[in-house]
Every structure is written in structure tokens, then in C-alpha cells.
Image (spheres, rainbow, N blue to C red):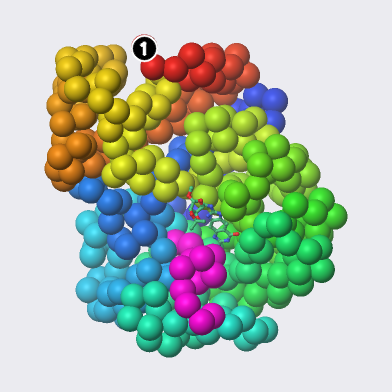
Amino acid sequence: MTKAFTFKVLATDGKARRGSITMPRGEIRTPAFMPVGTGGTVKTMYMDQVRGVGSDIILGNTYHLMLRPGAERVARLGGLHEFARWPHPILTDSGGFQVMSLSKLRKLTEKGVTFRSHIDGAAYEMSPERSIEIQGLLGADIQMQLDECTALPAMEKEIERAMELSLRWAERCRTAFGDQQGKAMFGIVQGGDIAALRLRSAQALKAMDLKGYAIGGLAVGEPQPVMLEMLDITCPELPADRPRYLMGVGTPDDILKSVARGIDMFDCVMPTRAGRHGLAYTRRGKVNLRNARHADDPRPLDEESDCPAARDYSRAYLHHLVRSQEALGAMLLTWNNLSYYQKLMQDIRAAIEAGAFEARAAEISERWARGDI
Ligand SMILES: CO[C@@H]1O[C@H](CNc2nc3cc4c(=O)[nH]c(N)nc4cc3[nH]2)[C@H]2OC(C)(C)O[C@@H]12
């Protein structure tokens, strides 16, 4: 069992990388998809199912957990791994993005951000130092710097101000994090959709010699070509021997195109959120189980899948559960969706190892585009 945080690139295929992160709590095979476990739970899933579909790491959120049940309480109860019964690696987002997208009455200064909880209106202050302290109390293996993500579209001056503030906060987070063996603190590249600002952010963070780098400020509603162009600009500036994490992404197509540009780690609410809304992701594209056309269909979602939710239940039954708003509907579709995403990641990793990523990605996209039978 390793004591340190290490990242190795095992194979490359064009700019796509097959890698491995090793940490005391286990290995993370990259490219990796991290199921979102915002409040310490991957909604509607038991953690052994999350593991069973092939997840190496899950994502938690500082913002949600500090509001409820509270970081100090989670620490008193043994930390998030113990609390949620997930003994494998956990990455926590730092909270800034959630404050800006969820909280009320927030005020951002050099010191940090003050805001009122979207749950009970209580007032909070989050500085870079407090964000790192909370992530430490939770016991996160990979901690994210506190940053300011600019909502797009935005004026260049505004994007530059937020990018420069995020760099100063990165320094403060690095100091607060210190040298915790076996854990990592990732910097987050900002700069919106402005190439020159992305370059400045990436180069300044690279000089901080961090263990990993996230690319933030994307998947906030910009068109996919804009997101991909920012990856084309940013990835070459980041050190090749450190993991690259594209925050909040994405659809299967987003993931394929981002792996092709050198991204190693992903997180997205889509597979879990879609599962709760009756939407199934399959090899043959999306299937909306709310649709009446499934009412008499005896076929499973995917007879070739090794996931019981995809293989053992008829579309008619899933349609019935979704229309009746039965909890089992959300549970089975979330299980199916996470299984599909992790199977996609396994496919991607194998294709890079075989030097066949481009062809495999085209095959997956073509099958997806043809749609469901
Ligand atoms: C499809 O779900 C919507 O898409 C957003 C995911 N997109 C996203 N981009 C992100 C950027 C950052 C960032 O710059 N910094 C930090 N620290 N964390 C971040 C987290 C991010 N997640 C979700 O965010 C909303 C709430 C808009 O709906 C979800």
C-alpha cells in the first residue's frame, strides 16, 4: 500500500493518456469518471453498487457538507470515508463554485466569500484557508483550491480579475494544505473563454508545482467547441506528469473529445441526475423511459450489459416505475447510468492501451448517434 500520491502515464495514443494515480486509499485508473456524491451520498445508490460498477473515486462537496451535517461533526464521526462507508479515494470540490451557483447574498472579497446558506439562511464565511481546513476535516484525499469561476459570457476584465484572484487563492491554499503525505491539493485553471488568460493561469499554476491540475470555468453553458478550444490551449501548458481534471464534464461525447485532448479525470451530475428523471444512458444512446412507447416493451435496456439494472428489467417495468414515481425507478436507472459511464471509461482506457482510441471513439459516437432501436 503506497504512502505517497503518485501519477504515472502508462500509455499514450495521440494526446489521449492512460494513467494510474496511486494513493493510500487505493488506485485511480485514468481516464476516470468520478460519480458525484454531493452530500456524502451518490444519490439512490449503495456505496458497494458504486464500487461494483467500477468507480475508483467519488466526489464530495465542501459547500453542501459544511452546511449539513457540518465539517466538524463529520470529523468527530471519523471523517467522510467512515461516515459514508466509502473506504476508497474521495475528491472534494472547494465550495466556491457551489457558493456562486447555489447560495444567497454572497459577497466576494480578497479574503474569501461570505454567503448565506440556501438551506436555512445562516451566514458563513469561506476563505481559502477555511476551505482547505474543511476538506481536511472531511478527510478528502484530493482537495481542490478555492477559486472563483466566472459565469460565461463575461467581460474580459471580469474574467481576468477572477483568474488573478484564483491564482492568489491557489498560493494561500497551497500554504494551508502544507505537505500532507498521501494526499493532494489540485490547482484550478481559470480564464474563461480567453486564450491569453488561460495560458497565464496555467503557467502560473504550473510554477507552483502542484500534484494535479483541474480545468475550471467550463461546462457552465458554453458551446462544446468553446470548451474544446480552451482544452487545446490549456492542456499543453500543464505538466505532462500530473493528472488533469476537467470539472463538471460531461456527456459521453464531451468525455471522448476531452480525453482526445489530454484530460484524465471527469465528474458530472448527468448520469445520476438523469437517472432520477427517467433517462437511461445506453450503448445505443439515451432512452427516455417516461415515453409511452416503452409501456409494452419486454426488452431490457441492454441485454449484453453485466449490470442487473440494464440486463434484467424490461423497459415496460422501468416505464411503469418512472411513471408511478416509484423510488426503484430512480435507483435502477441511476445504477444503469453509472454502469454505462464506467463501462465507457473502461472502453476508453483499453482503447488507449491498444493504440486504437480514435477509431474506438468514432465507433462509440456513431453507435450513439444512430440512437436506440
Ligand atoms: C450538468 O450539470 C450542470 O453543469 C455544471 C457542471 N459544470 C461545472 N463547471 C464547473 C466549474 C468549476 C470551477 O471552475 N471551480 C470549481 N471549484 N468547481 C467547478 C465545478 C463545476 N461544475 C453543474 O453546475 C450547475 C449548478 C450549473 O449545474 C450543473
Query: Residue 20 location, x and y as percent?
Result: 50, 39
Q: Residue at x 42, y 48 (%)?
A: 269
Vertical comparison of 357 with 92: above or below: above
Q: Is residue 55 above or below residue 140?
A: above
Q: Quadrant of residue 176?
A: bottom right
Q: Position of residue 14 (x, y in %)?
A: 70, 25
Residue 68 percent across, percent down from the top left = 30, 74
Residues 14 and 242: in front is 14
Q: SS of the residue at dot 1?
A: loop
Is the residue marked by circle 1 packed among few (<14), some (14-19), or many (20+) residues within 10 Å?
Answer: few
Up-down: is 334 above or below 70?
A: above
In the image, residue 246 sits, relative to residue 309, either above or below, namely: below
Does the segment drawn in magenta span residue 362?
no
Residue ID at (36%, 12%): 373
Q: Quadrant of residue 149?
A: bottom right
The image quarter containing residue 7 is top right
Residue lying at 50% horizontally and 31% vertically, measured from the top left? 252
- Can residue 346 be seen here? no
78 vs 187, left or right, is: left
Q: Is residue 102 magenta?
A: yes
Q: Nearer the viewer, residue 289 or 29?
A: 289
Amino acid marked by disc 1:
Ile
Judged left or right of residue 61, residue 130 is right
Who's the residue at 71% across and 74% down the image? Answer: 165
Q: Which residue is mark 1?
A: 373
Range drawn in magenta: 92-106
Q: Residue furthest right?
A: 196
Where in the figure is residue 302, as x and y percent of width and height?
29, 18
Seen from this angle, which residue lies furthest front? 292
Front residue of 8/347: it is 347
